[in-house]
Structure formats: C-alpha cells, structure tokens
Image (tube, grey):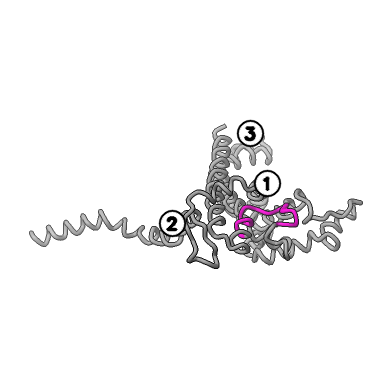
Amino acid sequence: MVLMDKATRRHRWDMKFAPYGYVAPYFLIFGVFGLFPLLYTIWVSLQERNLLDEAAARIIWFDNYAKLMADPYFWNAMGNTLSLWLLTTVPQILFALFIAQLLNRKVRTRTLFRMGVILPNITSVAAVTIIFAQLFGRDFGLFNWLLGLFGAGQIDWQAGTASSHIAIAVMVVWRWTGYHALIFLASMQAISSSLYEAATLDGASGRQQFWRITVPLLRPQIIFTTIIATTGNMRLLAEPLLFNPGAAAATGGSDRQFQTAALYLYEQGFTKYDFGYSSSIAVVLAIATVIVAGIGYLVTKRIRTE
C-alpha cells in the first residue's frame, strides 16, 4: 500500500512538473541569448559609456534618448529604413507568391527549380552585396549598360537617394524571395485539389482561382512572411554598409542617402565608440520594428477579413 502511494505521488509530480522540465531548456537559452542582451542594452542606453573606457561610464538616465529625438541624422536614418522596408517587403511577398504558383505546377525539372530558388538565400550576404555593387556600378555596371541599350543615360546608383534605395532593395529582394516562395509553395500543396476542380467546373480561370482560392487560403502564411520580412528589413546593415565601401561606408554615402538605422547604430558604436548612445538607438529601433510589424499584421489581418 505504501509503495502504491509513493508511485501515485511520483506519477502526480511527474504529470505536474515534467512539462516544465521539457520546455525549460528553451527558456534558459532564450534568457541567456535573448532576454539578458535586451535588458543589458537597455541598461547601457541609460549610461554615458565609451567602448574604449569602460571605467569612466556613468549613469545619465534618459539623456541619450533626449539627444536621439533631436538628432537629424537619426531621423534621416529612420526615414531611409522605412523607405527600404516598403521597397523590399512588398515586392518580396508578391514575387514569392508568383514563383510559388509557377513551381506548384507540373513541369519538368520541377525539383531543380525548387532547389534553385533557395540558392540566393544561402549565399553569403557580403558576396551578394559586393557583386551587386559592381552590377550597379556607374561606369561599367551591367544595369547601366542595359539602360544604354534603350538610350537612357548612366545612373550613379550610389549618389542618389531613390537610386541607391532601389539598388539595395533589388539585393534584398533577390536574396530573400526564394525563402518566402518555399513557404508559400508548401502551403499551396496542402490545399485540397477538389476546390480547384469545383472552380474549374464553375468556369473560373486560372487567374481567378489564384486570387479567389489560393491567396485567401494563404493569408496566415502571408501574415507570417510579412512579419519575418519586416523584422529583417528594419535592421538592414550589411547591404548598405558594403554597397559603398570606403571612407563613407558607415555613413551610408557621402550625404547619408542610404544610411539605415542599424548602420547609424554601427557608426555610433563601432566608429565613434559611443556605446551608450548606440544602445539607445538599438532600443528605439527595436520598438519601431515591433510597431511596424504590428501595423503590417493589422493591415494583413484586415484584408483577410474582407
């Protein structure tokens, strides 16, 4: 009887506490690599701290944030960030839907094409940026050569705000569209073929089936990819940093025409070594990313219900 009571208690404890033990590793890893860096960044943002002189750090509370709100370079970087977000996120989703629709059809070497769309995503971002910087070169770039065939003049892609944003957006879209396309493709294959068969019998064209059946059923995946793309595109760093290597790399061009918020953070933290100020930029950028991602989610959810 005593043994049965002990076994019963052990079973109850196991049923009550075992699930927490199973999920504990995730929370430990998140606490070490996610929560602690976030809290530490907030703590550093309240200080005047030079990266080369840690001993001289002192608490100044919210002075960094007050300085940041009055910093024209920061607002210029945020404007560039939002502009690049629009130029990269929307085309990524649209192109990914189109590519997934093509790959979902029964064509020859379909597996080869599916493998090909993911290759840009696994390519080094540094290699991609350096190659595209050459393609967008002013004097010998491929894109200017193609424009010359149609009688258009040469474009100094790095010098202008709009031209540099388009060039960087092309890099990002080329690299990440395949990733989103595979997500859409996997979801398309889970849609019942009976829906398309019924639509065909009703006389619906392929385009109508895509917009009336496929896209509405992919709305959860569209919301997910929109949030993923937003969080990535709001913290662009490598592309604008390597697009114009040299003395003006950290400033995003001679006139800061394509300096993103993440690049401005890099400039303040790792070229001027102002770790407190750069940490305040990181905190504000994180808040802005959450807000923009939330707006994107609400807009997509509203479209879903219409």
174 within the magenta span:
no
Q: Amino acid at mark 1?
A: Ser
On screen, residue 134 versus residue 188, left or right, reads right
Q: Nearer the viewer, mark 1 or mark 3?
A: 1
Quick one: SS at disc 1?
Answer: helix
Distance of mark 2 from mark 3, alpha carbons? 54 Å
Q: Nearer the viewer, mark 2 or mark 3?
A: 2
Question: How far is mark 1 from mark 2, CA to CA?
Answer: 29 Å
Residue 265 visible? The answer is: yes
Residue corresponding to mark 2? 35
Q: Do tag 2 and tag 3 residues touch (Cβ < 8 Å)?
A: no
Q: Nearer the viewer, residue 55 or 233?
A: 55
Q: What is the distance, in whole Å, between disc 1 and disc 3 at their CAs? A: 43 Å
Q: What label sits on residue 287 in the rendered view?
A: none
Indicate whether residue 255 is drawn in magenta.
Answer: yes
N-terminal label among 1 and 3: 1
On the image, the x and y values in percent for residue 21 come to 31, 59
- Circle nearer the N terminus (1, 2): 2
Q: Say which residue label 3 marks.
A: 202
Dominant SS of magenta comes to loop
Image coordinates of residue 68 in percent, x first then y, are: 58, 49
Question: Disc 1, disc 2: CB below 8 Å?
Answer: no
Q: Residue furthest left?
A: 1
The boundaries of the magenta stretch are 252-266
- Mark closer to the chain start, 2 or 3: 2
- Mark 3: which secondary structure? loop
Mark 2: amino acid: Leu
Residue 83 numbered mark, or none: 1
